[in-house]
DNA sequence: GATGAATGAGGATTCATTCAT
DNA sequence: GATGAATGAATCCTCATTCAT
């Protein structure tokens, strides 16, 4: 129930933050969008910053969970990345508001919550690095710098998403997974 | 002389915005850093937004100019990209404050000036696309989607810069150019 | 039963108001201390102000009743004052929280209830004045300004209590009755 | 000049706080009374609490300075107290707003500034204690508990002021000095 | 051209009170 | 009678911008 309300607020927040940016969004805007009183938001979140932080936490967790599940399937790394990219991009194509928030508002920079967002993002990069490491160990992937590879891979994803959703040129999201995989094809043995 | 003062202010702004983020930076902070009075800034910039916008305009212009010069040298595309990447990353390694601002503050989103920043960034992507197009025409590059390629290329650059400067792991910037080029080696004929 | 709950709430209110001051105490704080829900408080009190008002009303009434009883004993005025002071100070020494509230929160000033508190306090001053008047009539006390005397007497009591409980130097409360009586010894014939 | 503005704000604050109480006074009220913008107050005070704290600091300092001067005159203690009381009460009779604030708002209780106010008040009690100590040493005063005496003396002053200004019965302030001195006449040798 | 005090609109947050369960 | 989630008015404080000196 409480979880329910948190998600209702999260959804409203994504909607308005996507349009106006985090700093230009007032708590009143979020409340209006959620059909709630401002005070009610504070029954579920301790601050405006925490609302944003929760969006990242929640979404990154979903992706981490999906990756964890994929890992259990013991796929080839290439297949793993393909599935992950396809899903990630198609989710964002369906929910561009969310995508815009995830790529543009990670740096709102202030106090604690800002650091948490960075951690959520980095945990995805760490996960990717781990995947590449597995690939190297399994001799599916050449002996590259997997740390830099993860940063590079994540950066190219984010870059395409940002451009696609901001211009917007949403159809880019469809061709993106294949394109990205083709680009890194050289690392596979 | 006026140009001189604009740059003095720009430099101060980069310094403080890098540390606190644009929205958490007050005009007073910039004035303090520049050893000027707040009022003085308004003799050179019409608003806080314009200060940020100018940072992007100025820096993107320098890069565009550098690319224009490179173009005259009639290099192979691969060499062109190599030179550009090397210079861009080494400049940012020397001025990490600037780098942080360029990758993190592009989306402050409000009114006119926000749009201008997007344009400055996109003009770089357009330039890259043009370079890839030339490569295709010259048959140095395969017949790929050059638009997506430019977005991808730019995104991966930004991703590495952001990570490298934010963590920070500045040494990543050194290996980045070679790494990026190796990754896209497949597009060259 | 209802009276029971009112006193439970009163006790909790005294506890928290003593520590944080009336304006910094939230109804939630009182509810927590009383192990009740906020809503429940409103079944017994019409407002936050009324809670405070009740504390004064209740405590002042007790003291008035004690004085009324003492009056029936037909003691010498000096003895009367001695008994009253001893009791008042010893009660507060045992319940410093209450003392702090009684001396510090009388002036929260707003609307009706504020006026009521003033009345409760003044009724004690009036009672004291009446006592002094009786003393004068009985020729136990010189012909002084009994009104000013009552104000003076009450003020010195409050001053010592406030200092003793706030510093705190609770042991002051023990020597206070004798000290006060010694000070006004001159008024007795 | 800055000092000037601080005092302008102080005066306005005394006026409105006297009428509505500190917690019911908004910064806007003070600004209106001072014919200034709210923001301007914050150029001179860091917070609402500091405004109140300054009132106490400033007024207590004046009284301390007056007492220091009196001390140089090397008067008999009785004469000293007489002069001090007369001046203090007459100042408050002329500026009842100030008096009301000084006796009623000392306990607003929050964080740092609250503690400072207590210190300002206690410094006056300490000064009085020192005076009584001198009296004892000079054998003008009997060997009483000078600490308790100072607390008692201060309390009775405050009590009369509060009653006189709150009722109001301002004429009480006129007879108060003589009355108080008569009451403590017994301590003089 | 430089200054920095004054301005006041704007927004996050709090909390007494209500009322459906 | 008890509960506690929902409400939204109220208020402190910030800070971009102006303008008289």
Image (cartoon, coloured by chain):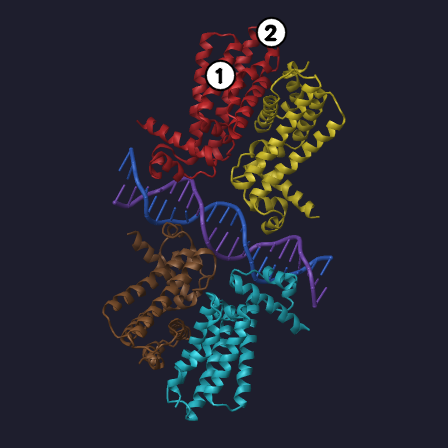
Chain colours: A brown, B cyan, C red, D yellow, E purple, F blue
Report in which chain the residue with disc 1 lies.
C
Residue B154, image x, y percentages: 44, 77
Residue A5, image x, y percentages: 32, 54
Seen in the image, is A121 located left or right of residue B89? left
- Circle 1 packing at 10 Å, graded few (<14), some (14-19), many (20+), is some
The residue at which mark 2 appears reads as C189
Seen in the image, is D37 located left or right of residue A42? right
Corner quadrant of residue B65: bottom right
Location of residue D14 with respect to D129 vertically, above or below: below
Q: Secondary structure at mark 1?
A: helix
Q: CA distance from mark 1 to mark 2?
A: 22 Å
> On the rendered image, what quadrant is the C terminus of chain D found in?
top right
Residue A37, image x, y percentages: 38, 52
Residue at 52%, 60% in the rendered image: B24
Residue A132, image x, y percentages: 33, 72
The residue at which mark 1 appears reads as C86
Location of residue B25 with respect to D80 vertically, above or below: below
Residue at 73%, 20% in the rendered image: D76
């Amino acid at each position: 129930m409480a979880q329910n309300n948190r998600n209702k607020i999260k959804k409203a927040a994504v909607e308005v933050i996507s349009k106006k940016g985090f700093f230009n969004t007032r708590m009143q805007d979020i409340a209006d969008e959620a059909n709630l009183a401002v005070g009610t938001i504070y029954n579920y979140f301790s601050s405006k910053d925490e609302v944003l932080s929760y969006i990242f936490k929640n979404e990154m967790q979903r992706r981490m969970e999906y990756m964890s599940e994929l890992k259990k399937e013991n796929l080839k790394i290439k297949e793993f990345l393909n599935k992950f990219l396809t899903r990630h991009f198609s989710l964002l194509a369906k929910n561009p508001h969310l995508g815009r928030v995830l790529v543009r508002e990670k740096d709102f920079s202030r106090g604690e919550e800002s650091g948490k967002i960075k951690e959520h993002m980095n945990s995805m990069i760490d996960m990717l690095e781990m995947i590449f490491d597995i690939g190297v160990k399994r001799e599916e992937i050449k002996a590259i710098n997997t740390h830099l590879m993860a940063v590079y891979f994540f950066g190219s994803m984010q870059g395409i998403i940002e451009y696609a959703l901001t211009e917007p040129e949403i159809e880019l999201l469809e061709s993106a997974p294949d394109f990205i995989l083709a680009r890194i094809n050289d690392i596979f043995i």
